[in-house]
Image (cartoon, grey):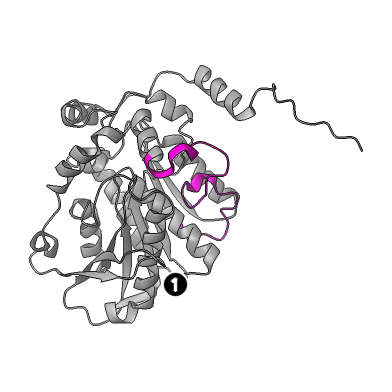
Amino acid sequence: MTTTAPDPTAPDPAAALAATAATLVGPPPPFDPELAAALRIINEVIPPGGFSLDAIDAVRQGAALENPSDEALARGGAFVIEERAVPGPAGAPDISLLICRPAGTTTPTAALYHIHGGGMILGTNRTGLNEFLLDMAQELTLTLVSVEYRLAPETPHPGPVEDCYAGLMWTAEHADELGIDPERIVVAGGSAGGGLAAAVALMARDRGGPALYGQMLICPMIDDRNDTPSSIQMAGLGVWDRAANESGWTALLGDARGTDGVSPYAAPARAVDLSGLPPAFIDVGSAETFRDEDVAYATRIWQAGGRAELHVWPGGFHGFDGLAPHTVISQDAKVARLAWLRRLLSQSG
């Protein structure tokens, strides 16, 4: 059989597909009316493309001021708060785990293993805890373990995800000491943390690690290619737009961003096989950059025979529930997440 060498002048199919998508994309979907009013105020502080590599230091300083204290996290004695330094990946520094145990429990609890958001470039293990996760942990009597991973660009891939996986391994191995049921650990994260949570679930499957009970992926950041119709539609709009997304992925991957061979442990949308994963909850706004990559991820889990619950919140911008928690749609999103987790934990297997 005769084979023909590829024509180097032929158009790149991926580039052609992206160009076609760009021409077919219509106007952006409208924001929810309540969220639109909030977004006008939010954008005065957080413009759509405000997370540039040049602005990292300033953004980090501002974000650090919002970290809750131990006293705030304890919620009047509902939780016992402890921070521990535990071994990181081989050859890497120790990592910090923030452990919030429900006070007065005498039997092992299920656990949320939390990975914070921040576009891969900012945040700590206290980021986002008081907005919703502790509400959920308090309601369902869960232990919450939140990992602090090294940030890009100072630590590119695979440093951040390996930190997260090392923290998960330590948590599972010390479950008895922590009062955790090792068979009921749910990994959870939002935005970049949602992407890292998805990657940790892939790693645990592939490495024979802890058998996770579930994965809660809130508007996860999972595709470095940044070329979906929703990323094109929402350019210059919302909170985390296409330019900000490019900055975050470039910080993590450098010149490899968007090229062939990017690891699924960096960008889970790159994974070929999504079978054998723990049940997933995935939600995202209809008016945000990550909409299409997240919908595709849920669809591919179903196609692989897996379990996934998908919510696309109409008119939701990125991180709407944390930035505008008073709105009806934000409250609905929180109710849906709590209901999924309650239902998951009530099942025997």
Name the residue at 58% across, 26% down.
15
State the quadrant of the N terminus.
top right
| Outermost residue, right side | 1
In the image, 337 versus 84, the foreground residue is 84
Q: Is residue 192 above or below residue 133?
A: above
For label 1, the residue is: 348
Is residue 345 visible to the viewer in this orientation of the structure?
Answer: no
Classed neighbour count for the residue bearing mark 1: other residues with Cα under 10 Å, few (<14), some (14–19), many (≥20)? few
User: In the rendered structure, which amino acid carries the disc numbered 1?
Assistant: Ser
**Magenta span: helix, strand or loop, mainly?**
loop
- Return the x and y of residue 315 as percentages of the image width and height: 32, 31
Span of residues in magenta: 251-280
Is residue 265 visible to the viewer in this orientation of the structure?
Answer: yes
Q: How many marks?
A: 1
Name the residue at 30% across, 56% down.
338
**Is 264 within the magenta?**
yes
As drawn, is 127 to the left or to the right of 337?
A: left
- Return the x and y of residue 145 as percentages of the image width and height: 28, 65
As drawn, is 59 to the left or to the right of 238?
A: left
Q: Is residue 166 above or below residue 232?
A: below
In the image, 38 versus 249, the foreground residue is 249
- Return the x and y of residue 187 as percentages of the image width and height: 37, 60
Q: Quadrant of residue 342?
A: bottom left
As drawn, is 145 to the left or to the right of 273?
A: left
As drawn, is 325 to the left or to the right of 260?
A: left
| Outermost residue, front side | 91
Q: Is residue 174 above or below residue 189?
A: below
Secondary structure of residue under mark 1: loop
Q: Quadrant of residue 210?
A: bottom left
